[in-house]
Image (cartoon, grey):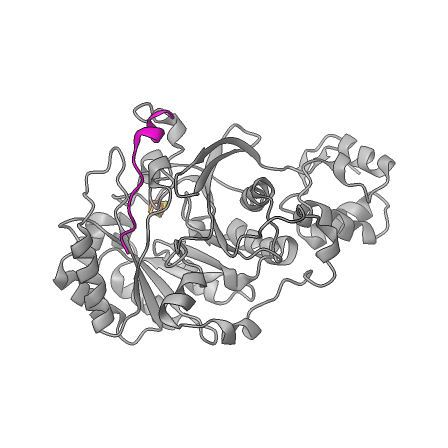
Amino acid sequence: MGEGLARSVLGMDRGEITALVSEAGEPAYRAKQIMDAVYRQRVESLAEISTLPQEFRERLAASGVSVGAARIEKKFSSVDGTVRYLIGFGDGQSVETVWMPEGDGGEAGDGSDAGVEAESGLSTSGAEARFQIPASDAGMEGLLHPPQNRVRPGRSTICISSQVGCAVDCQFCLTALLGVKRNLTAGEIVGQVCAVLKDQQVSPPEDRINLVFMGMGEPFLNYENFIKASRLLVGGVGIAERRMTVSTAGIVPRIHDFGEEKIRPKLAISLNAPNDELRMRLMPLNKKWNLEMLMAAARDFPLRTREWITFEYVLLGGENDLPENAREVAELLRGLRCKVNLIALNPGPGIEFTTPSADRVTEFQNILRGAGIPAFVRRPRGRDIYAACGQLKRTVEVATLPELQFQAISPLAPEG
Ligand code: SF4
């Protein structure tokens, strides 16, 4: 085993951990012990892996191997139960990860299937047989020891980041103001989930956890790490792929690649405009991949049984929220197996657009529904702590938004 080369176990798949174990001259079953400890029990140090001999743990540590757990640097709690985490990594960079607990219908339209079932009757049960069940579900229950006598949350969602910042430059998004600093590794993506699960004292599959890749960054611009993380979240952490959704701004070649993956989350496309002129203004990447290319990729996308594509549409007052825009969206999506999540703009400093009125949002929704397209209004979550959609900007850095000011912003009534 090589000396001094820093390596994190978090982010390694079964094959890589098996190679690590074999290199150390240990029996192959040690790989499963390490996998279980890191992904299922979510240990933060090698010293905690009690199934390994002490001598082996010390040898691993001496050779530069560590768990590589993500570190929660700050935590902001919203009046609606949402928690925004600032999660730090070894090089001093950080991202945001958001926990949205069950209990108020906020999951409807968050990209998970939870609220959709309730609201529309679009059951996913038929799809379950076609989706990969976490390989390690069987026989794992005894490994975890969640606190006894606590009420398990019915369904919760974790929104995770894939990059530090984002290069896509959507004009209504606070993250875009950061630019992109770097890609996250697969271990850093999975590490966010492990850190939040541990902090919230929940554990899949016993607790129903949905994951959305909708935090900071464009996952399809960090494709290899994103897809490896997805596989680890399924096979290692134990979250079924049907409970995960990835959102892309429209990286068309990667939508094609994604459709070929054997294990993959569901697909969401951030649409936000029904014609090229408007979309180019709101999302400059439309110059490279226009709506014709995007919609062709969506139509070609190999949907599984009873799966559908989610289109997200951020409504900007007076910009893209007019009745004729809704009619254009209906026309654009005609014939696609899809649903639309409508998100009234979440305000933030440096964003010039306005939040549309509740009436305008309802009218937009009704036009889509009238055209036969399932459309849901996404309730804003954690707006008071800058945790809502498009607000993730590591707000602790923003001088105009001191932490104390969060307390002064009143909670928002549900719009849907
Ligand atoms: S909306 Fe998503 S893709 Fe667009 S700039 Fe923000 S984080 Fe990037």
Question: In percent of the image, x 20 and y 56: which residue is there?
Answer: 361
Left or right relative to 121: residue 325: left
Q: Nearer the viewer, residue 234 or 105?
A: 105
Residue 304 place in picture, x, y as percent:
47, 73
Q: Nearer the viewer, residue 224 or 342?
A: 342
Point out the residue furthest to the front here: 149
Residue 106 place in picture, x, y as percent:
39, 53
Question: In percent of the image, x 34 and y 37: which residue is there?
Answer: 384
Quarter of the image where one finds residue 64 = top right
Residue 274 in view of the camera = no
Number of labels in the image equals: 0
Residue 80 place in picture, x, y as percent:
39, 43
Dominant SS in magenta: loop
Quadrant, the C terminus = bottom left
| Residues shaded magenta | 403-416
Quadrant, the N terminus = top right
Q: Nearer the viewer, residue 156 or 239?
A: 156
Residue 375 highlighted magenta (yes or no) = no
